[in-house]
Image (cartoon, rainbow, N blue to C red):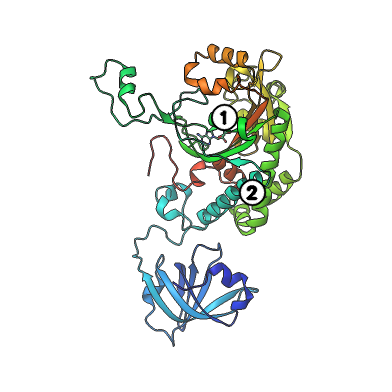
Amino acid sequence: MKHIDIIDIFEKSEFLDREVTVCGWVRTSRDSKNMAFIELNDGTSLKHLQIVIDKAVMSDISEFMKLGTSLKVEGTVVKSAVAVDSVEINAKEISVLGVCPPEYPLQKKRHTLEYLRTIPHLRVRTNTFNAVFRVRSVVSAAVHEYFQSRRYVYVHTPLITASDCEGAGEMFKVTTIGYSNEYKNEEEYNADDFFGKRAALSVSGQLEGEVAAMALGTIYTFGPSFRAEKSNTPRHVAEFWHVEPEVAFAELPDIIEIAEGLIKHIINAVLEKCPDELKFFDAHFEKGLIDKLTSVANSDFAVMTYTEAIEQLKKADVKFQYPVEWGCDLMTEHERYISEEICKKPVFLTDYPKEIKSFYMKQNPDGKTVAATDLLVPGVGEIIGCSEREADLDKLLEAMKVRGMSVEEYEHYISLRRFGSVPHSGFGLGLERMIMYVTGIQNIRDVILYPRTVGSIY
Ligand code: 4AD
Ligand code: MG
């Protein structure tokens, strides 16, 4: 269908005084004695294009005026009568592409995000979600730009896996048969299943990413990860998009530099390519958002050890719901206090107790901590989980033994330490959490097209 995108009508002066065809959905409309006005949106711009109808030229306009109706409009682009530096269209001919009845769930008023979650197929048509998805697209492209321009190889790791990377057991089982009494035990049941053994959706591409990095040097994966965590929080979804670089010949300080570089590259891309969207989020979701992002992009992130953070938390003049002691796993309230109150900016928290972290992390010489770091940011908490990997075969085997893990199941992974092992590091960035950070949106359910959470699937 030949037509011009609404964003081009606004941005390209060549259309002024010319006759054009535009298409879109009616966002609002207003009828007066001699004239009628329609705000049309085709998704290409946050701004609506005003269609001006002279009722002397067009009389039967009632169908055009209904919210949600899709229209094709032919007319002349003219300077706006009221808004400086803007244009509108004097309509010559309008045709209805699709009618929209009055029970259309999106009305003129501002709907709550909670209500909009119940209509994921329509909420995309609101300004909020238009802005979210444009930012999400720009962030995704920026991830690729960052790694591609540094010659990282983009690898696709399997989504169906037989091993549990994080060892937390929060995996969705993949099966083609239901368990039945016919099987003597689970082993027999698994043997009869599609793969002949237990399989699940991957929580992380890291283990296979390490395989690729041990050959290609620097790689990244960017795809969905799945977590069957029953945590019903504003920061967890069961299916999220995971950015995971893996870098050979890199120690913890090296990977921290790479992670900080990635976050800043993403922020700069959004600042540059989404100015209107950021203005919208700054006005409606987080006052001062643009200043925050500009300042984060131009200053160093903080680095602090876990041990130091525990000391600071114990000294803090606040009552936490969960008590703090060296060795405890940090809760969101702690993570947010560290980044929001102590550091007041993104902070890499390093050297966690080995007991609360995964088997693959490099053990520090102190025998108590691992060379791991989480990036904590104000407003969200953890957005990156990162570590240097244990490159020493014996130490890796020991860590697996302590956790009661099966050496057999991880044979390929372990043998990377047998055949020319090298220091290497990597991290995982949760795309949705990054988007929450750059938009100020507080709930992860509102930065993904279809959120999958415990007890809810639309
Ligand atoms: O900290 P996590 O569990 O680390 C890993 O999976 C490592 N294997 C990554 C690596 O080193 N290659 O997850 C990494 C990040 C978290 O910091 C968070 O941003 C995101 O993934 N994430 C989730 N995002 C939304 N919903 C969930 N349920 C998430 N679980 C993790
Ligand atoms: Mg983590």
Which corner quadrant of the image does residue 356 belong to? top right
Task: Give above or below for 179 relative to 220.
Answer: above
Of labels 2 and 1, the one closer to you: 1
Task: Give above or below for 106 relative to 73.
Answer: above
Q: Secondary structure at mark 1?
A: helix
Which corner quadrant of the image does residue 188 belong to? top left
191 lies left or right of 294: left
Task: Residue under label 2, please give it.
Answer: 145
Could you tell me which quadrant the N terminus lies in? bottom left
Image coordinates of residue 297 in percent, x first then y, are 72, 46
Residue 385 in view, yes or no: no
Count numbered badges in the picture.
2
The crowding category of the residue bearing disc 1, from other C-alpha atoms within 10 Å (few below 14, some 14 to 19, many at least 20), is some
Residue 121 in view, yes or no: yes
Could you tell me which quadrant the C terminus lies in? top left
Image coordinates of residue 283 in percent, x first then y, are 62, 55
* Residue at x 62% of width, y 14% of height: 395
Task: Residue under label 1, please give it.
Answer: 211
> Closer to the camera, 275 or 389?
389
Which mark is first along the chain, 1 or 2?
2
* Residue at x 66% of width, y 28% of height: 424
The amino acid sitting under disc 1 is: Val
432 lies left or right of 29: right
What label sits on residue 367 in the rendered view?
A: none
Which corner quadrant of the image does residue 15 belong to? bottom right
Image coordinates of residue 70 in percent, x first then y, are 41, 68
Q: Secondary structure at mark 2?
A: helix
The amino acid sitting under disc 2 is: Glu
Image coordinates of residue 281 in percent, x first then y, are 60, 53
- Report the residue that reaches farthest toward the right: 299
Q: CA distance from mark 2 to mark 1?
A: 23 Å
Task: Give above or below for 137 relative to 413.
Answer: below
